[in-house]
Amino acid sequence: MVDFFLQSNIIMHLLKFLISVPSIQTDPSKGATSKRSLFSVSSSRTYSTPTTLPVQSYGEKTGSVILPTPRTEGEILSSSQLKAFTFGDLKNATRNFRPDSLLGEGGFGYVYKGWIDEQTFSASRPGCGMVVAVKKLKPESFQGHKEWLTEVNYLGQLHHPNLVKLIGYCSEGDNKLLVYEFMPKGSLENHLFRRSAQPLSWATRIKVAIGAARGLTFLHDAESQVIYRDFKASNILLDSEFNAKLSDFGLAKAGPTGDKTHVSTQIIGTHGYAAPEYIATGRLSVKADVYSFGVVLLELLSGRRAVDKSKMGVEQNLVEWAKPYLGDKRKLYRIMDTRLEGQYPKKGAHAVSVLALQCIDHEAKLRPRMSEILASLEQLQDPKAAVVPLQADQYKASKPISKSPMRHHPAPISC
Ligand SMILES: Nc1ncnc2c1ncn2[C@@H]1O[C@H](COP(=O)(O)OP(=O)(O)O)[C@@H](O)[C@H]1O
Ligand SMILES: [Mg+2]
């Protein structure tokens, strides 16, 4: 979940805390004036049992949101519709977490492919029943238990076509696991950056950006706002048709309430994706997600990673390297992914680059809202929107990608 913890900022953070004074701050997106709250920092987090988290409650039929209430671990686990698996169930479902069923690895844990019975949810033989992805907490994982519970909490309650579906969990002593719907095309990261992956067409890149934008818009516009906090290519998962779903809610955080523009929190994130004001102050708002969204747009345009240590100087950081070329029609081609082989509409690419530039604005207030970004991206997908192909004669509609960089998963067989 978390690639790094920006510890060096804590010292800066503390210094600022000592010299800061309350001041008035306005955020036009909230249309209100509020007092800036002072922030608190902790360099390490301790876990007490039971852990309490603020959560939303959702009205059963209307999907309407009731105010957040702190809940204990027991309350979170018992109130959700999630299946409680035993460790033995998941051991069997993944054939004892066999290395060859490993789907991916994040900061929180290893993710394995497994099989369960569709009706009973008990482990089934490989190839029988339903495929699932099982995430197993790494014993050494930094603040793993809290992230596990945060994920159960949010994904147990939030349901949307662009959020990955959580089926259940396991909590047996130190064994903390999560069971998700299986996403056959894996993560966006694998498709964009793995050498063995087939290049994504322009149309697919736009489709993925729209799916992810829908997921973030849903979180930001919920009555009890949710800040996702770890938006990046490895947390965007893809189904068989390249519909994007956000996964990995371990860092998600309830947004500010009332007149507040941000929540003050521990600085955790991923290098290259985290917004500058959040890194500098620990003040978190939905605009930090918008910044990260802009970075992913740049990854989609350029096929380069947010941070690439194998490169030299300014090229190591995608935002710094790409910024001078964005929004300039004559220069943009210099940062475009060569794997697109020029097969993209020039106007569309320009529009995405302008959008990315707005998202990564240093001034959080000036960044657009996710709903505005979504509307702009949807226009690009609309065939009526005039997009002139770079090489009109060569431009082809996206071809379905036959091969996935993930292991090939056979269709279920009758059992
Ligand atoms: N539901 C899933 N289906 C297929 N692959 C998955 C699924 N969930 C995770 N993965 C793979 O595992 C990787 C790590 O998962 P993630 O949830 O981000 O873990 P962490 O919380 O440890 O960062 C992802 O980048 C992806 O490649
Ligand atoms: Mg992750």
Image (spheres, rainbow, N blue to C red):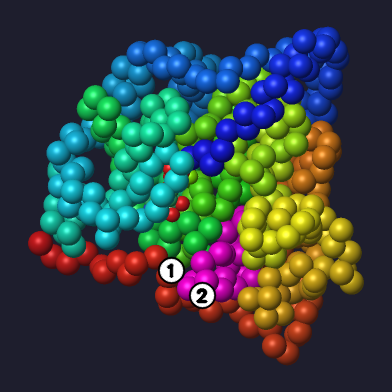
In contact (CB < 8 Å): disc 1 and disc 2 = yes
Q: In the image, residue 257 lies at what x, y percent?
A: 65, 18
Q: Is residue 257 visible?
A: no
**Hey, what amino acid is under mark 2?**
Gln
Per the model, the C-alpha gap separating discs 1 and 2 is: 8 Å
On screen, 211 above or below 255? below
Q: Earlier in the sequence, mark 1 or mark 2?
A: 2
Residue at image position (62%, 49%) is: 213
Residue annotated with mark 1 = 405
Which disc number belongs to residue 330?
Answer: none
Q: In the image, residue 133 lies at what x, y percent?
A: 32, 49
Q: Quadrant of residue 74?
A: top left
Residue at image position (36%, 46%) is: 110
Q: In the image, residue 200 lies at what x, y percent?
A: 57, 71
Which disc number belongs to residue 198?
Answer: 2
**Magenta segment, which residues?**
192-211
Residue at image position (68%, 71%) is: 337
Relative side of 365 to 196, left or right: right
On screen, 377 above or below 154? below
